[in-house]
Amino acid sequence: MATQTPSKAASSWTAGIRRGTDGIRRWLNETMLAGRPLIWYVTGWRFAVIALVVAILLPLVPTSAYSDIQSLLVAMISVFVYIMLALGLNIVVGYAGLLDLGYVAFFVIGSYTMAAGTYGSINDFAGKLHDLPTLPFILLIPIGAFIAGIFGILLGAPTLRLRGDYLAIVTLGFGEIVPVVFANIPIFFGQTGISATQPAPITTPVGIISFTDPFNHAPFYYLALAVAVLVTLGCYALRSSSIGRAWVAIREDETAAEASGVNLTRTKLLAFALGAFVGGIGGVINTAAFPSITPLGFSFAISITVLIMVVLGGIGSIPGVIIGALVLRLFDVFLLQRINDPVHQSFLVAPVNAPLHVLANVDFNTLKLLIYGIVLVAMILLRPQGLIPDARRRRELKGVGAAPEGVSAVGAFEQEEAGMSAATTADVLDPSEYTGAGSDAQGREG
Amino acid sequence: MAQEQATANSPTHDQAPSLLQINGLVQRFGGLTAVDGVDLDIRKGQIYSVIGPNGAGKTTVFNVITGIYKPSAGQILFDGTQVAGMKPDQIVRRGITRTFQNIRLFNNMTVLENVLVGQHTRLPGDVVSALFRLPNYRRAERRAEQRAIELLGFFGQGMIERKDEYAANLSYAERRRVEIARALGSSPKLMLLDEPTAGMNDAETADAVQYIQRLRREFNLTILLIEHKLQVTMGISDRIAVLDYGKKIAEGVPAEIQRNERVIEAYLGRKAAVE
């Protein structure tokens, strides 16, 4: 597997980073808030509660129309969409262990469902315009999800016998084909793309709520948040169900799973379908928020970005995947620009930094994928199990029986939790397991 | 000694109706014929052993019965229905279950989860009830969990206490037990055990022999067994079939098999047989 343990050669600079994470962990352990170490607050369900409260309160920060808070809200809408995408891909890659490199296909299908469902007209193949009834946005969410789900089955079916690299290549092909099909059929205006009509305002007892007010993004923010929360709950429910167990079982050992009565075809197709279903929801929401779409805007880079989110956060781990999506997408649509400008305008022009002046013409925005690539390589070297690993996956990568004790406070909380979530957040900052990393290979064989 | 007792107490079920009937089973892999026209007739309630030298095709017979391979020719009638060519999960649904020679647990799942996967066919598998945790779904999950614990309890309180342990952390003998508990989850009529005592010491083997007999008694099972240790097979089997080079060379009650010259020849060579 690519997720091998760090070798001795890489140890000098990795050791530096480990010291860094060690420092953060110690800081979390030693900094007290209301009589408890900070790490207590980022462990298990407390973290989920705190994150949700912060997410709900964020739009309530007093703000003027052009402040950063409003652009942060817009960025967060995109973050929520990518959280959905990452959770959807996590079903396929994380639970069922099927490497899907073409996940963007379902995002495209959801997006076009939203656009075609609200645009009001479509071309026929001769280029003649026809009226099409428009549908309300709220109805288009399930419709887009179902259409994407059906395509998930259609695209999944031919890959059932494939594993590993072969599966990855075929799915990669699908991810390329779907946008190209939309670019080349005139129905949805080909390469020109199409614009969705944004959701209509709704009248409530407390007043009219507009989803399109450029000075108030809060309503759409809450909408996207709500859908993301529903998707998350769905993922939790699935994971602990017999379906979730069957997914993990086929990932672990297909033959034994079949011999236990798991129908491979159905279980794999279900993973593809539900992953695609969630991708479709993401597409609908995204297009409702950012209505102009062009087929070639849906690139392979999206599939890869979502995959990196899953790997970064921790394959198979719901909190991990959410954090992965949050970190990367926020970096992409919010932080990068805000780092780029000051760096160019002050840091690089300062005479002290003369050796770095070669970078003056480099727009960091264009280096996004390079940065992702570096992050991915660093993750695989340093922390293959992800930021907040799934308990199972963490075991897999650490090897059998080698459960190193964390520093006291962390260890105590892990025991306290005692459930699946036990070793999640606290573990983010626990460097001790690297020390046992050398025994990984033996552990897996044993 | 426990073995002798069991043989004395249990009838050989020769008069019982047929549960698994295999007629003219052939399995080819390219140019190699691994199983060559094997007939077996396993009666309800029997402990039936298949023995033979390495490479005789015993495990292949198991793999064909459980649907991992499609037979090249021949019939497999289970409870009167043809199961040859069915998919493994359909065969599990009909009541055949198995364990593997090299134990195949889901190592990164807990013991309880492993046993729950074994009950997969008995749980509602639709997405809607799983997503919304409908009452009937939750009841089924709760029942499944109780049953999983009961199945672990078959091997004593110690296994119940291990239920939240990851399967990879178990001892060898414990792993065998979890595999059997998982196999019991589908409420089978026939259990195929592929070398259940391989790699076990004498004490563990004696223990395994005991629970194989208890399996038949307490779960009303018919057991088809591959076993290398002759003292095990001879002690607990009602009937034994001997395979060599993919062919059945002998069949009968243990006493007959022990005297059979072709069997001795297959195991020890021609010279030994003549002497």
Image: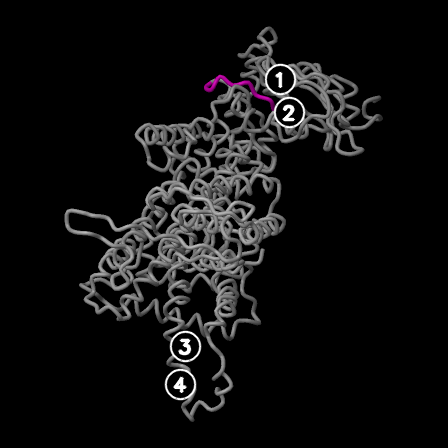
Residue type at numbered disc 3:
Asn
CB under 8 Å between discs 2 and 3: no
Give the mark toward the camera: 4 or 2. 4
**Residue A391 or residue B249, whichever sits in front:** A391
Which mark is in front, 4 or 3? 3
Q: In what quadrant of the picture does the C terminus of chain B appear?
A: top right
| Label 2 vs label 3, nearer the camera | 3
Q: Secondary structure at mark 3?
A: helix
Q: Which residue is mark 4?
A: A347
Q: CA distance from mark 2 to mark 3?
A: 63 Å
User: Which residue is tagged 1?
Assistant: B82
Give the mark nearer the N terminus: 4 vs 3: 3
The chosen color scheme is: one colour
User: Which residue in the structure is indicated by mark 3?
Assistant: A340
Which residue was labeled with disc 2?
A: B85
Q: Pointer 2 indicates a residue of which chain?
A: B
Q: For marks 2 and 1, give the CA distance.
A: 8 Å
Q: Is residue A425 left or right of residue B46?
A: left
Circle 2 crowding by C-alpha within 10 Å: few under 14, some 14–19, many from 20: some
Q: Position of residue B80 (x, y in %)?
A: 59, 12
